[in-house]
Amino acid sequence: MSHDQGSYGSDMERAKTLREVAEDIRGESSESKLVAAILYRISDLYDPDEETSPRDIYVNMREIIRTKET
């Protein structure tokens, strides 16, 4: 499957930074956990071992938010 990388090439330093921020903000509230999850998923754009696209992340996070709302 081909993913449009756009300006999201491999950048492990950026992925690491996003994951560290996600860990820092993850707290007990569902909102902080959700934001942390979003940041972690975004970090996958820069991880050469992950195959994802902005659209994949959007769809995934949209479904998580929809599920939480019901």
Image: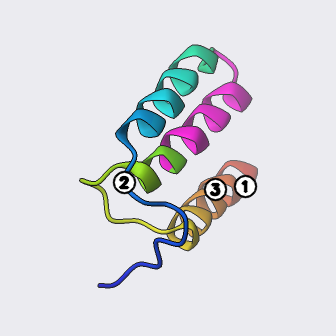
| Residue 41 falls left or right of residue 28 | left
- Residue reaching furthest bottom? 1
| Residue 46 falls left or right of residue 34 | left
Confirm whether the magenta stretch covers residue 33: yes
Q: What type is the residue that disc 1 sits on? A: Thr
Q: Nearer the viewer, residue 22 or 60?
A: 22
Label 3 secondary element: helix
- Which label sits in the foreground, 2 or 1? 2
Confirm whether the magenta stretch covers residue 60: no
- Which label sits in the foreground, 2 or 3? 2
Residue at (72, 55) in percent of width and height: 70
Secondary structure of the magenta portion, mostly? helix
Label 1 secondary element: loop
Q: Nearer the viewer, residue 56 or 30?
A: 56
Residue at (50, 69) in percent of width and height: 56
Q: How many marks?
A: 3
- Provide the residue designation for mark 3: 67
Q: In the figure, residue 58 lies in which quadrant?
A: bottom right
- Provide the residue designation for mark 2: 10
Q: Which mark is residue 70?
A: 1
> Which portion, as a residue range, is magenta?
28-41
Label 2 secondary element: loop
Crowding near the residue tagged with mark 3, few <14, some 14–19, many ≥20 C-alpha atoms within 10 Å: few
CB under 8 Å between discs 1 and 3: yes
Label 2, label 1: how far apart the Cα atoms are: 36 Å
Q: What type is the residue that disc 3 sits on? A: Thr
Name the quadrant of the N terminus. bottom left
Return the disc, 2 or 1, that comes first in the chain's sequence: 2
